[in-house]
Amino acid sequence: MGKYDDIMHLTRPQYPDLPQMSVQDRAVQFSPFAALTGFDDAVKETARFTDTKRELAEDEVQKINEALNRLSDMINENPQIELTYFKKDEKKDGGAYVRKVGYVKRLDEYEKTVIFTDGIKVDINDIGDIDIKC
């Protein structure tokens, strides 16, 4: 005779005020417990690389300033430009260099930004290279 033979024929208790739990919900109770919620994401974020913003040489700064002056003169034509700029990372130090091709809506001298027709704003101090497509 087995240890549980006396209760093997019994059914599971039913309670009128509690609905029967689905098999899937019952299984979830025994799933692994993640004591360190978000730990894996934090490790991945730490391992993600970012670039540092490089200092431009004097001749590079002069080239950018000349291009911005030309751009200012032709702003009414909504010129198309190709811009490489440093975009700061939102979560950690550093960022990445991004290439943007688009039409310029205006140059905001107060905020020192280039504003594209699609609404993207680029800080003039973050520009690494600029090429005006005429």
Image (spheres, rainbow, N blue to C red):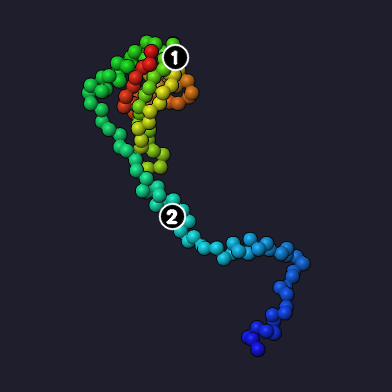
Is disc 2 placed on a helix, strand or loop? helix
Badge 1: few (under 14), some or many (20 or more) residues near its Cα, within 10 Å? some
Q: Give the left or right position of residue 65, taking residue 38 as reference.
A: left
Label disc, if present, on residue 39 of the rendered structure: 2
How far across and how far down the image is residue 115, in percent?
Answer: 43, 22
Q: CB under 8 Å between callouts 2 and 1?
A: no
Query: What label does residue 24 carry, if any?
Result: none
- The disc, 2 or 1, on the residue closer to the chain's N-terminal end is 2
Residue 42 position within the rendered picture, expressed as x and y whole percent measured from the top left: 41, 51
- Tell me which residue sits at (68%, 62%) in the image: 22
Q: Is residue 125 visible?
A: no
Seen at 38% across and 28% down, the residue is: 99
Whether residue 85 is visible: yes
View extreme (left): residue: 58
Q: Residue furthest bottom?
A: 1
- Per the image, label 1 sits on a secondary structure element best described as loop
Viewport quadrant of the C terminus: top left
Q: Nearer the viewer, residue 134 or 13?
A: 134
Residue at mark 1: 78
Amino acid type at circle 2 is Phe
Residue sticking out furthest to the right: 16
